[in-house]
């Protein structure tokens, strides 16, 4: 019985290499998706936390204006995080 190399143990070396490359690509895709999910969650958490820190006062119109002001300050940062997350997925 002739003893071959690792190719006999794992099959065709080129097929093994192709499958390992597919596995690595799949893993990278999952990492990008997890990073995007985390970035989007951070954007939402950041906005909610900023709104939660407001000590709203006055009538409904004044309160709405206070909340809009905070959102206007936080929204650009949240949008930047989401944009980076989307670019990471492409």
Image (spheres, rainbow, N blue to C red):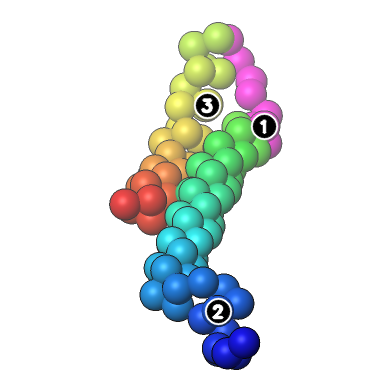
Q: Give the SS element for disc 2.
A: helix
Q: Residue at x 60, y 77 (%)?
A: 9
Q: Which residue is mark 2?
A: 8
Q: CA distance from mark 3 to mark 1?
A: 9 Å
Asked whether residue 7 is drawn in magenta, I would say: no
Q: CA distance from mark 1 to mark 2?
A: 63 Å
Magenta-highlighted stretch: main secondary structure?
loop
Q: Residue at x 52, y 53 (%)?
A: 30
Callout 2 crowding tier (Cα within 10 Å): few <14, some 14–19, many ≥20: few
Residue at 58% from the left image edge and 10% from the top image edge: 59
Q: Is residue 57 magenta?
A: yes
Residue at screen point 63% across, 24% down: 56
Q: Residue 25 in the image: state x and y as whole percent.
A: 43, 62
Within 10 Å of disc 3 (Cα), the crowding (few <14, some 14-19, many 20+) is some
What separation in Å lies between label 2 and label 3 (alpha carbons)? Answer: 67 Å
The boundaries of the magenta stretch are 52-59
Circle 3 sits on which residue? 67
User: In the displayed structure, does residue 64 sit left or right of residue 90?
Assistant: right
From what the image shows, is residue 24 above or below residue 4? above
Which badge, 3 or 1, comes first in the chain's sequence? Answer: 1
Q: Is residue 32 above or below residue 45?
A: below
Residue 42 horizontal side relative to residue 32, left or right: right
In the image, which is nearer the foreground, mark 1 or mark 2? 2
Residues at discs 1 and 2 in contact (Cβ within 8 Å): no
Secondary structure beneath label 1: helix
């Amino acid at each position: 019985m002739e003893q071959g190399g690792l190719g006999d143990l794992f099959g065709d070396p080129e097929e093994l290499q192709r499958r390992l490359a597919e596995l690595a690509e799949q893993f990278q895709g999952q990492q990008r998706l997890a990073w995007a999910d985390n970035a989007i969650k951070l954007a939402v958490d950041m906005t909610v936390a900023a709104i939660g820190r407001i000590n709203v006062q006055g009538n409904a119109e004044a309160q709405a204006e206070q909340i809009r002001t905070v959102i206007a300050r936080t929204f650009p940062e949240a949008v930047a995080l989401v944009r980076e997350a989307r670019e990471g997925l492409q």
